[in-house]
Amino acid sequence: MSIDNLWSPDNWLGILLRLCLAMFVGGMIGWERQLKNKPAGLRTHMLVSMGAAMFVLIPLAIGKNENGRDAVERVIQGIAAGIGFLGGGEILRESRQEIGKPKVHGLTSAAAIWLSAALGSAAGCGLWQLALIGAFMSLFVLRVIKNLERRSRK
């Protein structure tokens, strides 16, 4: 079995590998959020990432005609827009307005949820290099850049 056949959305193993990759890369982001005691943690990010992968896999698995790419592109557009509602809910939940002091919290968590959906979409499309590189770069932003921000405020 060649590597191309291994990742194919046409067989059980290919589907399993893509969904496991989506759970893994979403879990990488979710674990970092969990360690920071954020409400959207490990399970949320894993489910968002795997859900995005499943939405991408559906047209890949059934659409073997000339409109297959167009269908996948439309699904990804829908995921990108739709996941914003989940992120918006995270922002609203985290934002507590005190009298005279409106504050917005949860923007990074919302962005991490959105990113988990993108990572899952990449995994669902079989773009494992993109998914893994994106996950590691995301951890860099969430960990290293956060520390740089803290130091610059002192």
Image (tube, helix red, strand yellow):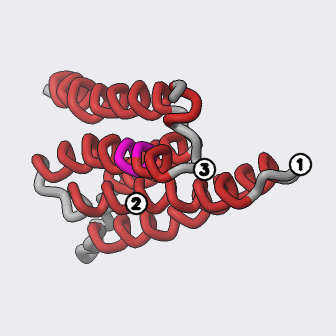
Identify the disc placed on residue 39: none
Residue 37, position as x, y percentages in the image? 11, 56
State the residue in front, 137 or 127. 127
Tell me where the magenta segment starts and ends, as one range. Answer: 17-21
Q: In the structure shown, which secondary structural element does the residue marked by tag 3 occupy?
A: loop
Q: Can residue 5 be seen here?
A: yes
For marks 2 and 3 on the same chain, the one whose residue lies earlier in the sequence = 3
Mark toward the start of the polypeptide (3 vs 1): 3
Residue 61 percent across, percent down from the top left: 65, 56
Question: Looking at the picture, does residue 9 appear above or below residue 154?
Answer: below
> Which numbered mark, 3 or 1, is in the foreground of this view?
3
The residues tagged by marks 2 and 3 sit, at their Cα atoms, a distance apart of 23 Å
Q: Are marks 2 and 1 in contact (CB under 8 Å)?
A: no
What's the residue type where badge 1 is placed? Answer: Glu
Residue most toward the right?
66
Horizontal arrangement in the rendering, residue 69 relative to residue 46 (left or right): right
Residue appearing at x 43%, y 30% in the figure: 134
The residue that disc 1 covers is 66
Q: Secondary structure at mark 2?
A: helix
User: Taken as a whole, is the magenta stretch helix, strand or loop?
Assistant: helix
Q: For residue 117: magenta?
A: no
Which of pointers 2 and 1 lies earlier in the amino acid sequence?
2
Reading the image, the residue beneath label 2 is 48
Question: Residue drawn 41% across and 25% down?
Answer: 133
> In which quadrant of the rendered image does the C terminus lie?
top left
Does the magenta run of residues contain 18?
yes
Seen at 17% across and 30% down, the residue is: 150
The amino acid type of the residue labelled 2 equals: Val
The residue at which mark 3 appears reads as 10
- Residue farthest front in this picture: 1
- The answer for how far apart the CA atoms under marks 3 and 1 are is 17 Å
Rendered residue at 78%/52% (across/down): 64
